[in-house]
Image (cartoon, rainbow, N blue to C red):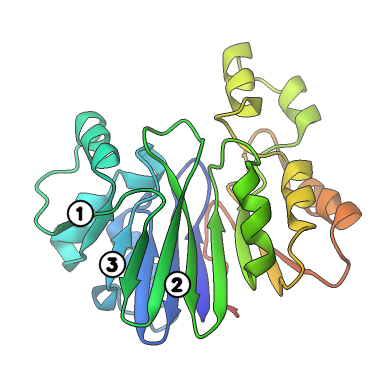
């Protein structure tokens, strides 16, 4: 199994996973041309992707989904509520190949399964994902809202994880955001702090690596996020960071 974060952050999200001949894209928050270009740099053709799976209705995850489908023929997988809200808020255009799932259900692509888990983030019907194949499991855990109980039960089963590490509390408090936005970010439907992410990773007893994702541009920094995690997680756990501007490169599991 391999994974590439093509981009991660409030400016756009898109993640590629490939295993057992199945190729999946999660979210369409960057332009289809940019996604294709970034995949091509790793000898991957976006037209070979078997499914585009959308996590929730926020623009940085769904806004280009219609173009991905029309330009490259990608089947779209999305919850009905998420699609309804996305159509109302974003100009997705005509959609021809829509496949619905319910948050909490499982998607199957040959021998590859994608377990969906409802997320308390403030999308209308958000989900996070576990991709499983050949006894290898990858978690895709961003836009979590807060650390809910089910995360602690599934983290020990994962071999690797993309996990949001959105903000440093001190930077957020002292930063330029208005009070209502600070409250949203810290609230139960917002995002995880660096420390919350690190404490959750402590339960990952079989993790080979974790990739810190969805870092805030204004309320976090790579050195602070990494330092916070290094103070808490096992020293043998490999840590990567997903950039707001470029791919991670190929991460192997």
Q: Position of residue 124 (x, y in %)?
A: 37, 32
Q: Is residue 29 left or right of residue 249?
A: left
Q: Which residue bears the numbered disc 2?
A: 17
Q: Residue at x 33, y 71 (%)?
A: 108
Q: Is residue 172 left or right of residue 247?
A: right
Pointer 2 local density, CA inside 10 Å: few below 14, some 14–19, many at least 20: some
Q: CA distance from mark 2 to mark 1?
A: 20 Å
Q: Is residue 60 left or right of residue 242?
A: left
Q: Which mark is residue 93?
A: none
Q: Residue at x 58, y 47 (%)?
A: 214
Q: CA distance from mark 1 to mark 3?
A: 14 Å
> In the rendered view, would you say 18 is above or below 151?
below
How many numbered discs, if any?
3
Q: Residue at x 47, y 30 (%)?
A: 122
Q: CA distance from mark 3 to mark 2?
A: 10 Å
> In the rendered view, would you say 245 is above or below 71?
above
Question: Which callout, 1 or 3, points to the residue nearer the camera?
Answer: 3
Q: Is residue 164 left or right of residue 69?
A: right
Q: Disc 3, disc 2: CB below 8 Å?
A: no
Mark positioned earlier in the residue sequence (2 or 1): 2
Which quadrant does the C terminus fall into? bottom right
Pointer 3 local density, CA inside 10 Å: few below 14, some 14–19, many at least 20: some
Q: Position of residue 87 (x, y in %)?
A: 20, 36
Mark positioned earlier in the residue sequence (1 or 3): 3
Q: Which residue bears the numbered disc 3?
A: 51
Question: Which callout, 2 or 1, points to the residue nearer the camera?
Answer: 2
Element at label 1 = helix
Q: Which residue bears the numbered disc 1?
A: 67
């Amino acid at each position: 199994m391999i994974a590439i974060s093509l981009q991660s952050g409030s400016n756009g999200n898109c993640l590629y996973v490939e295993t057992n001949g199945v190729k999946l894209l999660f979210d369409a928050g960057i332009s289809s041309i940019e996604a294709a270009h970034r995949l091509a740099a790793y000898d991957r053709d976006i037209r070979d992707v078997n499914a585009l799976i959308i996590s929730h209705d926020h623009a940085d995850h769904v806004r280009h989904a219609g173009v991905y489908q029309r330009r490259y023929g990608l089947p779209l997988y999305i919850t009905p509520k998420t699609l309804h809200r996305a159509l109302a808020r974003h100009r997705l255009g005509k959609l021809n190949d829509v496949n619905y799932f319910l948050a909490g259900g499982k998607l199957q692509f040959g021998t590859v399964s994608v377990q969906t888990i409802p997320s308390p983030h403030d999308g209308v019907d958000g989900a996070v994902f576990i991709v499983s194949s050949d006894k290898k499991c990858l978690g895709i855990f961003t836009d979590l809202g807060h650390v809910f109980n089910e995360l602690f039960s599934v983290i020990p089963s994962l071999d690797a994880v993309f996990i949001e590490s959105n903000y440093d509390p001190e930077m957020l408090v002292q930063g330029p955001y208005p009070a209502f936005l600070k409250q949203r970010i810290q609230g139960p439907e917002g995002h995880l702090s660096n420390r919350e992410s690190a404490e959750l990773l402590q339960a990952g007893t079989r993790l080979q690596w974790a990739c810190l994702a969805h870092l805030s541009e204004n309320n976090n920094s790579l050195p602070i996020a990494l330092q916070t995690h290094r103070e808490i997680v096992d020293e043998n756990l490999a840590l990567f960071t997903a950039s707001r501007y470029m791919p991670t490169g190929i991460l192997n599991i």
